């Protein structure tokens, strides 16, 4: 890994916004969950580095983009949340690569790539999160995955040190990414990515994006608060098929419900679900599938914090 010196540590004044007891329901797409003891919105990368350098080594830290793959338990998160989503995140063309900061929404990357004559980014239009979140979980859909198109990344450590890493520094697979020699999401986080797409036709790419978005609208409950696919697909099967075969479409616990439109989605239709309702429904569906089919469903969503 090519590392630089810590940036911003000499700064005596942080320029970002620090919030105390921040309701995380505002920042996760399920619109449910407890509060974070602290939440920080960095002004830029240098400010983020300076802020991380101030935290105790044992401080739990959670980076959050669009919160589309996250559930914060009702008891809240006893640590610091770094809120990374920003509509002003940088994205630009650098030679044959596309540079994107982690705060950039994935659909923006897809459209930017098409506009600049690239193909292979269209699947990102169907990823309901940021570039940072897509990197952290190897998000994908329609047969493509994020790490298929990563050329290199920039990361930041707990101490505020920024450096570049190559794909060879990581191990990844279906909805998982691991960093050799460091704990991704605990000691190191993504700060930027350079994506490599193939040269192509803009009109064809835009057409494909429209087709994928239409398919997503037709098959997923996008009109209701949800977190995307709740479970990974087991080898050779689909989680939605297994849950539907257990006749769980429409099944509800508290304010949370398994979608009638797509059985691998849990929705919060009236915005009154507690995180505990959602987690209980996740467990209920897992148990039902295990008992009927002997298949252990693995959640895609990350669950953090304390129970109420």
Image (cartoon, rainbow, N blue to C red):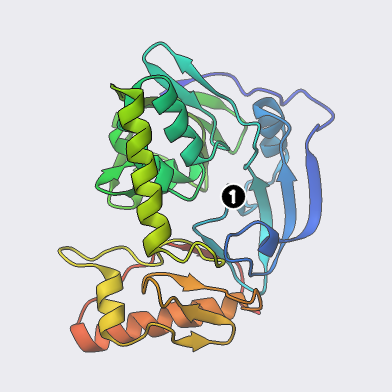
Q: Is residue 236 visible?
A: yes
Q: Judging from the image, what secondary structure is the residue with disc 1 in? A: strand
Eyeballing the image, is 82 above or below 13? Answer: below
Q: Quadrant of residue 166?
A: top left
Point out residue 42 in the picture as x, y percentages from the top left corner. Answer: 71, 36
Residue 73 rendering spot, x and y as whole percentages? 60, 71
- State the residue in front, 15 or 100: 100
Disc 1 marks which residue? Answer: 64
What residue is rendered at 80% in x and 33% in y? 14
Q: Quadrant of residue 231?
A: bottom left
Horizontal placement of 77 versus 249: left or right? Answer: right
Q: Residue furthest right?
A: 13
Q: Is residue 152 above or below residue 74?
A: above
- Which residue is rendered at x = 66% and y = 31% of the image? 88
In-front residue for pair 265/288: 265
- Give me the residue at 32% from left, 63% from top: 232
Please state which of residues 157 and 135 is positioned toward the viewer in this rendering.
Answer: 135
Work out which residue is located at the far top of the displayed protein and give it.
Answer: 95
Residue 241 at x, y percent in the picture: 25, 74
Does 172 sit above or below residue 121? below
Q: Quadrant of the N terminus?
A: top left
Left or right: 218 as drawn, with respect to 143: right
Q: Quadrant of the C terminus?
A: bottom right
């Amino acid at each position: 890994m090519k590392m630089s010196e810590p940036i911003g540590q000499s700064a005596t004044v942080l320029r970002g916004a620090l919030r105390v007891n921040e309701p995380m329901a505002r920042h996760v797409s399920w619109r449910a969950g407890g509060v974070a003891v602290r939440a920080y919105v960095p002004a830029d990368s240098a400010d983020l580095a300076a802020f991380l350098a101030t935290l105790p080594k044992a401080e739990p830290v959670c980076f959050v983009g669009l919160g589309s793959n996250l559930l914060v338990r009702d008891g809240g998160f006893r640590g610091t949340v770094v809120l990374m989503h920003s509509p002003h995140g940088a994205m630009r063309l650098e030679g044959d690569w596309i540079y994107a900061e982690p705060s950039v929404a994935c659909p923006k990357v897809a459209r930017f790539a098409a506009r600049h004559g690239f193909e292979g980014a269209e699947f990102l239009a169907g990823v309901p999160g940021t570039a940072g979140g897509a990197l952290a979980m190897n998000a994908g859909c329609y047969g493509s995955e994020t790490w298929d198109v990563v050329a290199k990344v920039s990361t930041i450590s707990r101490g505020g040190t920024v450096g570049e890493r190559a794909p060879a520094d990581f191990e990844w697979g279906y909805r998982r990414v691991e960093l050799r020699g460091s704990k991704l999401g605990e000691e190191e986080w993504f700060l930027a990515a350079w994506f490599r797409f193939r040269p192509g036709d803009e009109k064809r790419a835009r057409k494909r994006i429209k087709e994928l978005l239409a398919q997503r609208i037709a098959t997923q409950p996008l009109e209701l608060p949800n977190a995307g696919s709740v479970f990974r697909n087991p080898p050779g099967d689909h989680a939605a098929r297994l849950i539907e075969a257990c006749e769980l479409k429409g099944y509800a616990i508290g304010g949370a419900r398994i979608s009638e439109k797509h059985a691998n989605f849990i929705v919060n239709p009236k915005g009154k679900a507690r995180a505990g309702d959602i987690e209980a429904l996740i467990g209920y569906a897992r148990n039902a599938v295990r008992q009927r089919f002997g298949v252990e469903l693995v959640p895609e969503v990350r669950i953090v914090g304390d129970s109420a």
